[in-house]
Amino acid sequence: MTPSNTDKPVDRLADAARKAAESAKEGRDNPEPSLGTRLGQIGILGWTIIVPTLIGVLIGRWLDRIFETGVFFTAPLIMIGAAFGLWSAWKWMNRA
């Protein structure tokens, strides 16, 4: 004997209703952050990347002035500062 086809739509409807109720409960328990919170997070990410890069520029320019080397120290320190800033931002975004 084969099962009747009328059971499948009822089961799908019940599953969909159950999933919608679970989703609504999850939304009430863990609401999305506000727009202001999201903008603040974006600002923090920007500063997390920019500050180490600027520190690299300042230290590099200072060393280049002392040793009269053009951009010998500035260029690599910009890259190191940017890499550190990007790594810090990545760690901050993926924190538990």
Image (cartoon, grey):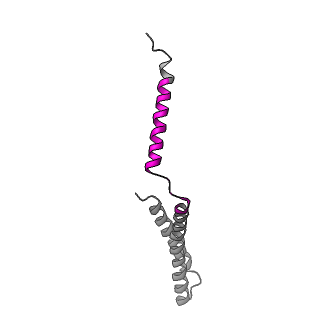
Question: How many numbered discs sit on the rendered protein?
Answer: 0
* 27 w.r.t. 16: above or below: below
The outermost residue toward the top is: 1
Span highlighted in magenta in the image: 10-37
Is 18 or 78 nearer to us in this picture? Answer: 18
Q: Name the residue at 56% across, 59% down.
A: 35
Q: Nearer the viewer, residue 62 or 47?
A: 47
The quadrant of the image that shows the N terminus is top left
Query: What percent of the width, then of the height, locates residue 47?
Result: 53, 71
The answer to whether residue 1 is seen in the rendering is: yes
Q: Residue at x 42, y 59 (%)?
A: 95
Residue 82 higher or lower than 58, as above or below: above
Quarter of the image with the C terminus is bottom left
Relative to the observer, which residue lies in front, 94 or 44? 44
Q: Quadrant of residue 94?
A: bottom left
Q: Residue furthest right?
A: 70
Image coordinates for residue 60, horizontal then vertical, percent: 53, 81
Task: Specify whether residue 11 is painted magenta.
Answer: yes
Percent across and percent down for residue 29 are 43, 49
Quadrant for residue 46, please give it. Answer: bottom right
Kindly report the secondary structure that dominates the magenta region of the rendered protein. helix
Residue 30 lies, with reference to residue 92, above or below; the image says above
Where in the figure is residue 9, as x and y percent of width and height?
51, 23
Q: Residue 42 occupies which quadrant of the picture?
A: bottom right
Drawn side of residue 39 relative to residue 31, left or right: right
Asked whether residue 5 is drawn in magenta, I would say no
The relative height of residue 49 versus residue 74 in the rendered view (above or below) is: above
